[in-house]
Amino acid sequence: MDVVNHSGFGLDEVDLAVDRYSDPVIRLITQRHITSGATATFDLGACSDVHKFAASAFIGNREVLHTSDIDPRPSCHTQIEITHT
């Protein structure tokens, strides 16, 4: 799963919440300091085990991206592009 930052601003944090069939706890994966033009790439592991996921991005304490739940089917490869904040 990729979050591409085309916003012209650096992102302080990109979070990915992952819900797996094999794990009753939703896991949070975080990447920090995503510069403008850079991509935050998250390895979701086995696609068949991913039930759903959602992404958020922050500049300081301000949330500039928040997706609803994303169904990984038919492919876990998802690309989200941030073009403005």
Image (cartoon, rainbow, N blue to C red):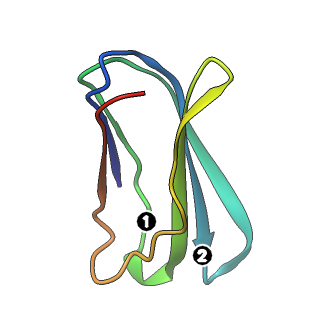
Between residue 55 and residue 68, name the one nearer to us: 68
Q: Which residue is mark 2?
A: 20
Mark 1 touching mark 2, by CB under 8 A? yes
Amino acid type, mark 2: Arg
Q: Determine crowd level at label 1: few under 14, some 14-19, many 20+ residues with C-alpha closer than 10 A.
A: few
In the picture, the quarter occupied by the C terminus is top left
Q: Residue at x 46, y 69 (%)?
A: 70
Q: Residue at x 58, y 46 (%)?
A: 29
Decide if residue 27 is on the left or right side of residue 6: right
**SS category of the residue bearing label 2:** strand
Q: Name the disc covering residue 45, or none.
A: 1
Q: Name the disc covering residue 65, or none.
A: none
Q: Position of residue 15 (x, y in %)?
A: 57, 42
Decide if residue 76 is on the left or right side of residue 69: left
Q: Determine crowd level at label 2: few under 14, some 14-19, many 20+ residues with C-alpha closer than 10 A.
A: many
Query: Going from the N terminus, do you reach mark 1 or mark 2 first?
Result: 2
Say above or below: 81 vs 67.
above
Q: Position of residue 13 (x, y in %)?
A: 55, 28
Decide if residue 80 is on the left or right side of residue 51: left
